[in-house]
Amino acid sequence: MFGARSFLYGLTAATAAVTLAAWPLAASAAGKPIKIGAFVSATGPGSFLGDPEGKTLKLEVARINHDGGFLGRPLQLVLYDTGSDTKQAVTFVRKLIDDQNVDVLIGGSLTGSTMAVIPIVQNAEIPYISLGGAVEIVEPVKKWVFKTPHTDRMAVEKDYIDMRQRGISHIGLIAGSVGFDESCRGQAKDLAAKYKITIIDDETYAPTDTDMTPQLTKIRAHRDLQAVLDCGSQAPTAITARNYQQLGMTKIPLYYTHAVDSQEFIDAAGSAAEGIRVPAAAMLVAAQLPDNDPQKKIGLAYGKAYTAAYHQPISTFGGHAYDALLLYTLAVKKAGTTDKAKVRDALEQLHGIVGVDGIYNLSPTNHMGLDTSAFHMVEIHDSQWKLLY
Amino acid sequence: MAEFLQILASGLTVGAIYALIGLGFSMIYNTSEVINFAQGEFVMIGGMVTVTLYAGGQIPLAVAALAAIGITALVGIAVERLAIEPAPQNNLTTLIIITLGVSITIRGLAEVVLGKNFYHLPAFSGDTPFDLAGAEVTPQAFWVIGSLIAVMLALAWFFNRTRLGKAMLATSQNRMAAELMGINVKMILRLSFALSALLGAIAGVLTAPITMTKYDVGVMLGLKGFCAAVIGGLGTATGALFGGLLLGVSEALAAGYISSSYKDAVAFIILLGVLFFLPEGLFGRARGERV
């Protein structure tokens, strides 16, 4: 059954690739195009990540070409949809490297697909900017691998700091059983001692679960419960929030990670989203930032362009792709060439780069370049993101 | 005690959904001996079409739901007419594999036509939970359980009191004899697909406010419904009912009292246990092999 399913995904992906492979030869830009190879989970379970990522890449490539391209050369985007299938990701990355001879790889919406393509990328010696979340992608440092999204570890730290400020020390933990959730759950347990947090209950659910009240009932039974942290990253996250409200637990603060930072989550959770706290990148609350905030301008511009083009609100996920392309173009500018080894070296020297996800300070030992300061604490209020600090 | 009731309520609601889907499996199995793996897609179509009509078309929820259930029944007939009927009828495995193909096709079409995001439907009677001796139960849970009871009563009336229902029963008992008695077996087969699509769609509409809906929700719900039907005994309505409830309640109890990690394992242990000790299911009758 699943073989047949991946066959279908393969088919859709192949069709998508044919239609999506953009050939943006802007009139003003001459010369051989710079080839951007991208592979995202535009369909399948990871579509909430890959869909805005792919759209952002198309939007940005079109904008850069409209402005005359780069180094006098247009950008050419070759975008594949992996259908959230790791095997497809591997196949497409081979194709991008061997057949398309791309200059850079961007993508791997899921931690799983990123980890699977790393050996190929390392072998082919091509700069690769991953859009996967987990910290293991860049720790330990791999020569050709970079990433833009904040890690699960940073998100948990931000949540813990906020909890301590509110005098919370005893929390219940709930997480799904997919890659990001598992990793986040591990980080939450690992960091608990450092922030003097006691995890009094630890529950899980499957990504296809439809009702989390049994798990939450169990958590609720603890008398010393002060807050709940949900490490969930895929759809049932909104169900947890709804069940939380149903069980009358809304007086107990509920925290999520940046994995729910999309309007889709707020809409799905409805009134149950009220009062939920999440760490979020500046772009989600760009309009509420003080005017002197360096990220305000870029965040607003990205949000405006994206909403104008696709009639959808931005999510944090498209921002990862925006920053990946930004870092690459800046590295090319710094290196003055698209030579792979020189661009890679230039990537490591990028400092103080203002992206929509945060301010990047890359180095030979840090291939992500963000720290917890890239996160703002945000509370959902009247179905809107409200900036706390 | 309140804790137990809370977990029980959750289990019964989820179980009622499994039972509705299991009923659809049983109905088609009865008339054609085909296990229709596209059953989960009927659930998905029910939910997704309702959401599309309601949110996109600004049609009142009740009308959208009824229209979606009707559309799904038509899809059921189309599946029988276009995919099952033209295939050679003497090889069950082929037919079952065809239903797999149908389910993939429907899922792919839904992804393209209806969209690939999660969609959410408002609850029929609001979100304010009732307090039942300390357990917070949503109004939607009453809708689900009430609909299951209504469906069971309607089916009992249909099979015992109407000529058409009796013709379906006759076909399920002996297809050739039924044909010789002048029953239009082809029509009965189409009807069984229409009815089970209808049941699936009802489940889909009822669950969309609880679980949200997406083009691929049918996969897992279909599998759980299939488990429910097998546990209860394929082909019996009571079997699907109790199989579904047993599955839902034991999953909830496992999540609430043992560990949520073992929840799915419990479902499969029950399935294995039933298949090992009662291969025909809890309520199944031994079937003679036709030679």
Image (cartoon, rainbow, N blue to C red):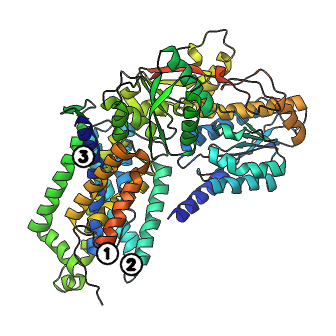
10 Å neighbourhood of mark 1: few (<14), some, or many (≥20)?
some
Question: Residue furthest toward the bottom?
Answer: B291
Instruction: Decide which of tag 3 and tag 1 comes sooner along the chain.
Output: 1
Disc 1: which residue = B33
Residue B55 is situated, as x and y percent measured from the top left of the image, at 37, 37
C-alpha separation, residue under disc 3 versus residue under disc 1: 28 Å
Q: What element carries label 1?
A: loop
The reply to whether dot 3 and dot 1 touch (C-beta < 8 Å) is: no
Instruction: Decide which of tag 2 and tag 3 comes sooner along the chain.
Output: 2
Residue B78 is situated, as x and y percent measured from the top left of the image, at 36, 65
- The front one of B43 and A162 is A162
- The front one of A298 and A144 is A144
Q: Is residue A277 visible?
A: yes
Q: Do labels 2 and 3 share a chain?
A: yes
Quarter location, residue B37 = bottom left
Disc 2: which residue = B92
Depicted A59 relative to depicted A354: above or below:
below
Depicted A225 relative to depicted B27: above or below:
above
Q: Chain for mark 3?
A: B
Quarter location, residue A273 = top left
Quadrant assignment for the C terminus of chain B: bottom left
Residue B150 is situated, as x and y percent measured from the top left of the image, at 16, 52
The reply to whether dot 1 and dot 2 touch (C-beta < 8 Å) is: yes
Quarter location, residue A330 = top right
Numbered label attached to residue B144:
3
Q: Are marks 1 and 2 on the same chain?
A: yes
Three-letter residue code for mark 2: Leu
- The front one of B244 and B181 is B244
